[in-house]
């Protein structure tokens, strides 16, 4: 079959992901090759101290994104998009969308970006003996209880963004395991919300007059490949107001962006992981078992199949690095030089690898925003050096590269050095890896692990969601997710792998010791500047 025939026959899968600045749709064939795409740009708003998107933002954005996909199909193949083989939605994890028994939204959508649940997160972390981040859905719900908000007695259901969209299109109140693990802790043995923690939580809320059990308010948890319902007639009209799209399409469990990132980088088996490095940076490492104790620096989530994952999430990565590159661009223009930005990045990044592996006494703090992993609440980009430091262009650039991943390294050092986690492979994706070999070598030194970069890593979460949709309707239903990825998605794919340089590993460790000692200067800058 050619692509036109595949589209007409519904031999396709569609993944749509709601990112923080873009909604993206990817249509793939049965072999997970991208055949059409569509997108829509959007932005969150700060309203009454809360970062939010309105329901109108969600639906007009989704409809425009889908319309652009259908337009791409029509222009490329002269074919109307009337059906697909399977469909799935993913979105930014966490946050709080709460509804009453009439399915009316009770308060504006509180996104993951909000840091307004500190009291709840602290109480829950202590009571559950589990590191509870502020952005998790259960932190938002419990904070609303602590605040005695008027809407709490009316809550009939609360969910994530992906769970909400899926519910509206299918009628099913379900959530994929990875996304659910950002609502409430998951027990990886049962693949369900942790029963003991549910019991503890319900006792805590009962003492505050809440009689409804929290498990009755949250979506049902499903693993990748399970049936999550079908697109209803109302849902089809909501997604495609033109009426061209047919109902009855099988729908995959809705997922979070972390889960689709794991799928898109083939990092779902024990000992594998991925690092996404752009404006922010986070790592996901799949574990054989739970950690020995909770760490404030590490979030525990799951893969779409429910296996435990240690996540280190950092708010800052390349923004300060980009700012310095722009200074060099401005300097070059001052002398009448027209230098291509890709060439500028390439030359400066490669220059970073020429001199001292420990940066020679030069430190860079890239904090545009706060970094909870190291206890810094606000951002103040800071550059510090000793008077006798070897202050060269090479050490300056290396320090900026080391600094962009420093907080990620601090979090992962706990896994590698305290918990003795064995890592088999890490896949890097994002803007930091565009200059061949440089970001890859720095990350390899930071994690003391081989780092791979795939040719498809740029496809992103919408593609990962389409792969999950295809997995649900695979011919061999007994085939595991890992086997499906190995045999049907990533077989024969071009992969570049780089081992850590022992000298860089040693130098980065030395750099980090100085970096941690000098964090007091960063804290002082926040307090006084």
Image: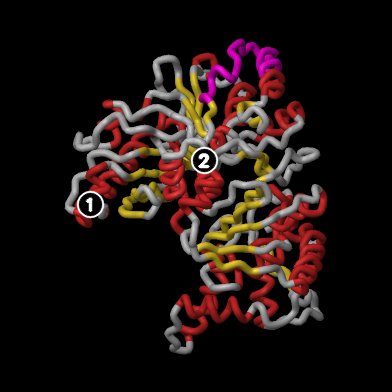
Above or below 312: residue 397: below
Q: Can residue 330 be seen in this view?
A: no
- For mark 2, give the secondary structure: loop
> What residue is drawn where x is 36% and y is 50%?
41
Q: Between residue 471 and residue 350, name the one nearer to us.
A: 471
Q: Residues within 10 Å of mark 1 (few under 14, many from 20)?
A: some
Viewer-side label of 1, 2: 2
Coordinates of residue 107 in the picture (x, y in percent): 47, 27
In percent of width and height, residue 66 lies at: 30, 44
Task: Label 1: state its secondary structure.
Answer: helix
Decide whether residue 373 is among the magenta residues.
no
Q: Residue 130 carries which label?
A: none
- Tell me what residue is drawn at x 32 percent, y 51 percent: 38
Residue drawn at point x = 44 percent, y = 88 percent: 336
Q: Kindly indicate the quadrant of the structure image that contains residue 408.
A: bottom right
Quarter of the image for the C terminus: give it.
bottom right
User: In this picture, is 217 found above or below 432?
Assistant: above
Q: How far apart are marks 1 and 2 (CA)?
A: 28 Å
* The residue stretch that appears in magenta: 202-220
Residue at the spot of label 1: 4
In this picture, residue 226 sits left or right of residue 411: left
What is the x, y in percent for residue 42?
38, 47
Between 295 and 522, which is closer to the camera in this rendering?
A: 295
* Circle nearer the N terminus (1, 2): 1
> 211 or 432, which lies in front?
432
Identify the mark at residue 479; answer none if there is no mark.
Answer: 2
Task: Give the answer, above or below, for where 133 lies relative to 404.
Answer: above
Q: Which of 179 and 98 is in front in this view?
A: 179
- Give the residue at the far left of this rendering: 78
């Amino acid at each position: 079959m050619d692509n036109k025939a595949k589209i007409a026959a519904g031999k396709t899968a569609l993944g749509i992901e709601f990112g923080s600045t873009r909604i993206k749709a990817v249509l793939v064939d049965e072999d997970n090759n991208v055949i059409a795409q569509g997108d829509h740009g959007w932005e969150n708003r700060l309203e009454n101290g809360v970062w939010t998107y309105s329901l109108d933002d969600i639906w007009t954005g989704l409809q425009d994104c889908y319309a652009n996909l259908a337009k791409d199909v029509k222009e490329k193949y002269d074919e109307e998009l009337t059906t697909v083989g399977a469909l799935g939605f993913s979105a930014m994890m966490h946050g709080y969308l709460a509804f009453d028994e009439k399915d009316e939204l009770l308060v504006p959508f509180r996104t993951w970006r909000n840091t307004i649940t500190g009291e709840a997160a602290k109480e829950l972390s202590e009571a559950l003996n589990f590191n509870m981040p502020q952005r998790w859905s259960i932190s938002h719900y419990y904070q609303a209880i602590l605040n005695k908000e008027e809407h709490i007695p009316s809550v009939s259901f609360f969910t994530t963004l992906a769970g909400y969209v899926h519910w509206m299109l299918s009628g099913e109140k379900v959530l994929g395991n990875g996304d659910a693990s950002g609502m409430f802790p998951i027990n990886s043995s049962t693949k369900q919300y942790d029963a003991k923690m549910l019991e503890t939580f319900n006792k805590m809320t009962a003492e505050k007059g809440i009689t409804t059990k929290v498990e009755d308010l949250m979506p049902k948890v499903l693993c990748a490949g399970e049936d999550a319902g079908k697109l209803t007639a109302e849902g089809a009209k909501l997604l495609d107001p033109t009426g061209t799209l047919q109902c009855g399409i099988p729908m995959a469990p809705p997922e979070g962006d972390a889960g689709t990132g794991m799928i898109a980088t083939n990092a779902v088996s024990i000992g594998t992981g991925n690092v996404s490095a752009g404006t922010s940076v986070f790592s996901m490492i799949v574990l054989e078992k739970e950690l020995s104790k909770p760490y404030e620096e590490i979030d525990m989530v799951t893969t779409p199949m429910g296996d435990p994952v240690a996540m280190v999430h950092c708010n800052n990565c390349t923004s300060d690095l980009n700012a310095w590159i722009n200074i060099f661009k401005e300097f070059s223009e001052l002398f009448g030089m027209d230098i291509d930005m890709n060439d500028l990045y390439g030359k400066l990044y490669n220059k970073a690898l020429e001199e001292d592996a420990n940066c020679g006494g030069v430190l860079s703090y890239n904090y545009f925003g706060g970094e909870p992993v190291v206890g810094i609440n606000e951002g103040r980009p800071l550059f510090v050096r000793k008077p006798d430091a070897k202050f060269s262009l090479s050490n300056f650039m290396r320090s900026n590269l080391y600094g962009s991943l420093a907080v990620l390294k601090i979090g992962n050092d706990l896994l590698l050095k305290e918990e003795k986690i064995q890592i088999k492979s890490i896949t890097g994706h994002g803007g930091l890896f565009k200059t061949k070999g440089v970001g890859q070598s720095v990350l390899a030194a930071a994690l003391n692990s081989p780092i791979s970069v795939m040719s498809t890593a740029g496809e992103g979460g919408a593609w990962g969601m389409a792969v999950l949709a295809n997995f649900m309707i695979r011919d061999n239903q007994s085939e595991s997710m890992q086997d499906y990825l190995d045999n049907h998605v990533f077989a024969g794919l071009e992969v570049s792998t780089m081992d850590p340089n022992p000298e860089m590993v040693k130098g980065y460790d030395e750099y980090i010791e100085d970096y941690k000692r000098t964090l007091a200067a960063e804290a002082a800058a926040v307090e006084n500047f």
